[in-house]
Image (cartoon, rainbow, N blue to C red):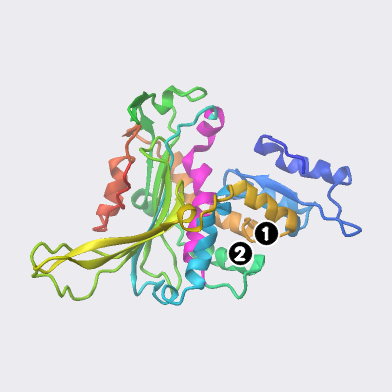
């Protein structure tokens, strides 16, 4: 399996040259597959054009658009957790869930990718692929089978159901940030604008927070809050399901009682596992209610090291299982969510960049996005 590290502008040309050399034809029981890494386009129009150019040469079942996040054990386990456990699927809807948070935090800056990243930014780099994949697996309807297209059909439906943001929505439901200098793990790190290959006046975002709504029966009225950024205090990816408060607070008059909600947290990286919090009586003569966390980690429970994302996905490609790869319509649906933000942000450059210090959890406007709905981001210990 030859691999090429190449600029995205050459993706279509390489595929077309493979075809001219006769390397894309499947005959005599032999398969030919092409794996394409992100970025898959830089907006909706370019993604559509790239899909058209590649599909003019290859069939859809020959194209494997790879996203290493989907090779992680916990991401794959979302479907097993939801659809193989009768206690969770009945409450996985607007009746019981208040909101969903998806967080992807990176401690790294742009490293040696300043030239690429300064043209792309976090919105293009992370949201149409990684974040939309996590959202779609969390929100999808049960597929009729675990076959690739059955699963991807349901993911595509969810992505198509995300309410598009108009210009006014973009101003109120999307936050962008850029890191300045700061302290990270006790070490002072430079601002984004001082990184190699980055313009000293750059307006490229390194942090994004969004409020998205899914316009279907299951999720009507349940907001999905998404945030992703660089130079955060901790490398961490998680999906938090925040359940609604109980309708009647029976123990509200007991001493030391604190209102709490049930949370289900799916830890994607670096430690892969699942945690569930619930209320319980604290031992003692006085009735006191506290929050208890029940959790497990894959490595500790099963005693096996998790496979790397690419290891899983490249194996799936070789055996012809496309379940964990994006299909053309999924790619375009992800860009359809992002395009309105790109347009508004281009027309209205940010005024306060940099607006968060390296080593923090992003700009204060991201907290305000939640606080305006009387909610808050789950606190992640650094």
List the residue tagged with mark 2. 152
Q: Nearer the viewer, residue 252 or 274?
A: 274
Number of numbered discs present? 2
Q: For the stretch drawn in magenta, what is the main secondary structure? A: helix
Name the element at disc 1. loop
Q: Is residue 150 left or right of residue 229?
A: right
Query: Is there CB contact under 8 Å for labels 1 and 2?
Result: yes
| Mark toward the start of the polypeptide (1 vs 2) | 2
Numbered range of the magenta stretch? 114-141
Q: Position of residue 139 (x, y in %)?
A: 47, 65
Residue 329 to residue 379: above or below: below
Q: Residue at x 82, y 41 (%)?
A: 17
Instruction: Please say whether residue 130 is one of the residues in the magenta stretch.
Output: yes
Q: Is residue 76 magenta?
A: no
Q: Position of residue 189 (x, y in %)?
A: 38, 25
Q: Residues within 10 Å of mark 1 (few under 14, many from 20)?
A: many
Residue at image x 36%, y 66%? 222
Q: Secondary structure at mark 2?
A: helix
Tag nearer the camera, 1 or 2: 1
Q: Is residue 203 left or right of residue 307?
A: left
Q: Position of residue 9 (x, y in %)?
A: 68, 37
- Residue at figure coordinates x 29%, y 53% from the top left: 370
Res. 201 visible in picture: no
Q: Tell me the quarter of the image containing the N terminus.
A: top right
Going 52% across and 50% down the picture, which residue do you hit?
130
- Front residue (pair 149, 115): 149
Residue 319 figure quarter: bottom right
List x then y, in percent, for residue 366: 32, 46
Give the number of the disc on residue 322: 1
């Amino acid at each position: 399996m030859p691999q090429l590290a190449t600029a995205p502008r050459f993706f279509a040309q390489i595929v077309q040259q493979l075809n001219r050399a006769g390397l894309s034809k499947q005959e005599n029981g032999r398969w030919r597959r092409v794996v394409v890494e992100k970025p898959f386009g830089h907006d909706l129009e370019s993604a559509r054009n790239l899909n058209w150019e590649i599909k003019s040469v290859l069939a859809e079942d020959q194209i494997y658009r790879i996203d290493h996040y989907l090779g992680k054990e916990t991401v794959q386990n979302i479907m097993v957790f939801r659809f193989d456990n009768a206690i969770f699927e009945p409450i996985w809807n607007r009746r019981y869930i208040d909101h969903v948070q998806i967080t992807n935090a990176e401690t790294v800056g742009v490293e040696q990718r300043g030239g690429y990243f300064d043209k792309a930014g976090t919105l293009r780099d992370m949201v149409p692929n990684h974040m939309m994949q996590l959202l779609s697996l969390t929100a999808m309807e049960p597929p009729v089978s675990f076959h690739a297209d059955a699963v991807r059909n349901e993911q595509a439906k969810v992505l198509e159901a995300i309410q598009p943001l108009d210009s006014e929505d973009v101003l109120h439901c999307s936050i962008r940030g850029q890191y300045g200098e700061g302290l990270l793990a006790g070490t002072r790190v430079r601002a984004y604008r001082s990184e190699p290959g980055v313009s000293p006046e750059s307006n490229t975002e390194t942090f994004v927070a969004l409020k998205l709504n899914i316009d279907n029966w299951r999720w009507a009225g349940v907001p999905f809050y998404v945030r992703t950024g660089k130079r955060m205090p901790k490398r961490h990816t998680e999906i938090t399901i925040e359940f609604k408060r109980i309708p009647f607070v029976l123990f509200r008059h007991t001493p030391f009682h604190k209102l709490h909600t049930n949370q289900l947290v799916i830890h994607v990286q670096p430690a892969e596992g699942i945690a569930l919090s619930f209320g319980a009586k604290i031992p003692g003569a006085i009735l006191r209610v506290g929050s208890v966390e029940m959790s497990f980690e894959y490595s500790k429970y099963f005693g096996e090291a998790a496979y790397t994302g690419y290891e899983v996905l490249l194996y799936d490609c070789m055996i012809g299982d496309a379940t964990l790869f994006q299909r053309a319509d999924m790619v375009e649906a992800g860009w359809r969510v992002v395009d309105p933000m790109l347009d508004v942000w281009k027309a209205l450059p940010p005024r306060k960049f940099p607006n968060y210090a390296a080593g923090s959890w992003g700009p204060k406007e991201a907290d305000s996005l939640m606080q305006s709905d009387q909610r808050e981001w789950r606190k992640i210990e650094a």
